[in-house]
Structures are given as C-alpha cells and as structure tokens.
Amino acid sequence: MLYLRRFLPQWRMFVVLLLGFSSGVPIALVGGTLQAWMASLKVDLTLIGIFSLVGLPYTLKFLWAPLMDCYIPPFLGRRRGWIVLCQGALVITLIGMSFCDPVRNPAMLAVLAFLVAFSSASQDIVVDAYRADILEKKELGMGSAASTLGYRIAMLFSGACALILSDYMTWTSVYLIMAASIGIGIVVTVFAPEPRIPPATPTSLRQAVVEPLLDFLKRKKVIELILFIVVYKMDVVVAVALMTPFMMDLGFTKTDIGAVTKGFGLISTLIGAFAGGYWLSRIGMKRSLWLFGGLQGISGICFTILATLGHHYPMMVIAIAAENFFSGMGTAAYSAFLMSLCNPKFTATQFALLTSLMALTRTVAGAPTGWLAKTVGWNHYFIISMLLMIPGLLLLTRYEAWMKQDVES
C-alpha cells in the first residue's frame, strides 16, 4: 500500500475511479445488452419488455441500505467488506447468466438478472457511502468526476464493447468476460484505504432505519432542501427526455444520433464533470451550484436554435456538446452537495434516500414531456425547459439557512 501511495499521490481518486467502473459494468448487462442478446435469438418483444422489471432494485435500494449501515462483515471493515461481498455476488450471478438460454429457460435468466441488479444496486449503496467517507469535503467534486468517468467507461465496455464482441464470440463468452472484469473492483477494494476517521456504526436496526431519517428531517428548512434536491436538475431532465424523437423529427439518422449523443456527448459529459470538480474545489460549493446550475439551464438555448434551423449537423453537435458539458459540471457540484449533506454515521442510508429523490425527478418530470412537446412545439418546449432552472436557483438563495447547522453542530 505504501508503495502504491508513493507512486500514486491521488491513490484515493484512483480507487474511486475504479470502483465507479465496478459499479457501471452491470447496468447494461441487465438492460440494453441483455435486450440485444434476447433480440438476437428472436425472443418475443413482449417478454423482452417485461424483462425491464429486473431493474427494480436500482429504484428500491434505499429499502435495504440501512442494513448495510448497521451490520459489518467479518472482514475488510464496514464499507469494503460489503463492497467485496456484492462484487463476489456479481461475479457468481453473471457467470450463471452466461450459461442461461433465453429461449428455453427465460424464467431462470430473469431470476439471475434480478439477482445481478440487486447485487449491483447494493454495491452502489456502499460504493457511494465509501466515497463520501474516504474523501475530504474539498475532494468531493473531483471524486464525483472520477467516479463518473469510471462509471461511463464501464457502461461503454458492457454496452458497446459487449455488442461488438458478440459478433465474434458466443454470448456465454461475452458474459464471462464481463464477470471477469468485476475482478478489477475486487482487487482495488482489497487494497483500498480505510477512512482516516471511521464513522460510528449504528448498533441496532432502529438506529440504522429510523435515526437516519430523523437525523435528516431535523435539519433546518428541510422542506426547502428537499424541494431543491428535486428541482435542481429538472431543466436538464426535461431538455433531454425526448432527445431521440426530437433529433429524428429533424431528419437525423439513428447513426447520427448514436454517434453524436452517445459518443461525442459522453466525452463532453466527462470533460464537464472534471471541469466542474476542478472549479468546485476553487470557488466552493455554493458558487458552483449557482454557476453550473445557470449554465446547464441556459445551454438549452442551443436546442431552441437547432429546432429553428432544422437538419443542421454542426448545430446538432454544438447543442449536444454544450448540454452534456454544462450538465456534467452541474452533476459534479450536485453529487458533491448531496454527499456533504450525509451524516457519516448514516452515509449509506441517507445517500440512498437522496439519490432516490433524484430518481423521482426523472420519473415525475419526464412523464408529461411528450404531451408538452406535442402541444407547444419543439421551440417552446426547450424554452420551457430553460425556465425550469429558475425554481432551483431561487431555492439556492436559502443555501446559508440549510448549511448553518453544520457550523453550529
């Protein structure tokens, strides 16, 4: 460990990056990649659609997060022990999936895919908590960017790369390779450092379940704070909710959309996340939330211009680059802010709850977007999405009231 630290001064960031990779690998394997596997074998589309339910653990992970705060595995400590257990479960269940036949035994495949999703969501709970425990407050922005980088690389690996590999080998081999890649996370977790000041551990389920909720709810102006968490990224959620139908309506091909939004857009997001992490450490949390929140909202004007110009490839690239870059900056500050709200004693439970509020934004704000676009047209739709940045910025004027208790406590 001392040898590694000597040659890797940012060892903790490196650990965060590779744990982000470990978290990102399973997502596509129970999502898009699994759908491609089933479609390639001519599995009925209705059944493929039903398989989307295996992803439910990602939305419900806050239900068992308290258990991972309360109980400590007999090895590697409170966080790393759980991470390794989840990673081991991922390896076993992915190997099991690799030997399943989607045509002859879809039920078994569904069970194993659900277990992969459950193990993956559980790993996310503890990796998020470990990141909050291991990093200092000034490092949270760059830590969020490093985790995002690892996560996005993993999604490319288990998504695009897996599909390419499937043209040259069997799906069994593809999933075995994906299972082996989790080994990177296991090795990193074993050698990862412990928090310098380990957080106190709940001694009962009541402390793990009830007290984290009460601890958060007793914050000053907690209703304002919850509203801010819900609405801060609403402008981005609405702007990108119908991106593929919008681009297709303008005459862009699926190849154009895939290459620019998935390829170039990913690069822009990663650059934005690291830029956001860097500037967060320079100008502080409050200024970052203000600046990045405004920029991610205003960037929607590029889509309004694109809607006016129509099939204009250069403007399409500019719009995607701007939206992803500034959204990446906003995400870096937003994730760091959520981590800063967590009591170290209840990090896993509270961060799982806060990320569930983020998921609520995607569900609620995304639902009426189709009706809205159809009613007002694309130009006005994106103008409305830009205006949705205003509630979050207005609530941000209350930042000192939310954070004052940290100074008093």
Image: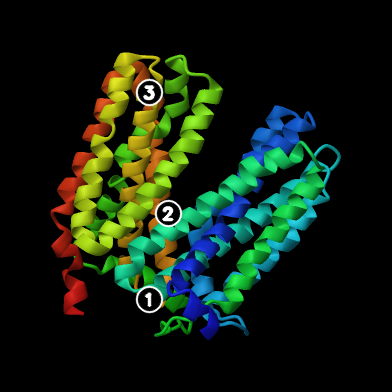
Q: Report the amino acid beneath label 3.
A: Pro
Q: In x, y percent, where is residue 184?
A: 64, 65
Marks 1/3: CA distance? 47 Å
Q: Where residue 277 is drawn, which disc sits there?
A: none
- The mark nearer the N terminus, 1 or 2, is 1
* Tag 2 secondary structure: helix
Tell me where residue 118 sits by quadrant: bottom right
Read off the residue under disc 2. Answer: 356
On-image quarter of the N terminus: bottom right
Q: Where residue 344 is drawn, which disc sits there?
A: 1
- The mark nearer the N terminus, 1 or 3, is 3
* Tag 3 secondary structure: helix
Read off the residue under disc 3. Answer: 314
Q: Is residue 284 visible?
A: no
* Tag 1 secondary structure: helix
Marks 3/2: CA distance? 37 Å
Image color mode: rainbow
On-image quarter of the C terminus: bottom left
Q: In x, y percent, where is residue 307?
A: 33, 18
Q: Report the amino acid beneath label 2.
A: Ser
Label 2: how many Cα within 10 Å (few below 14, some 14–19, many 20+)? some
Give the residue drawn at x 54%, y 76%. 192
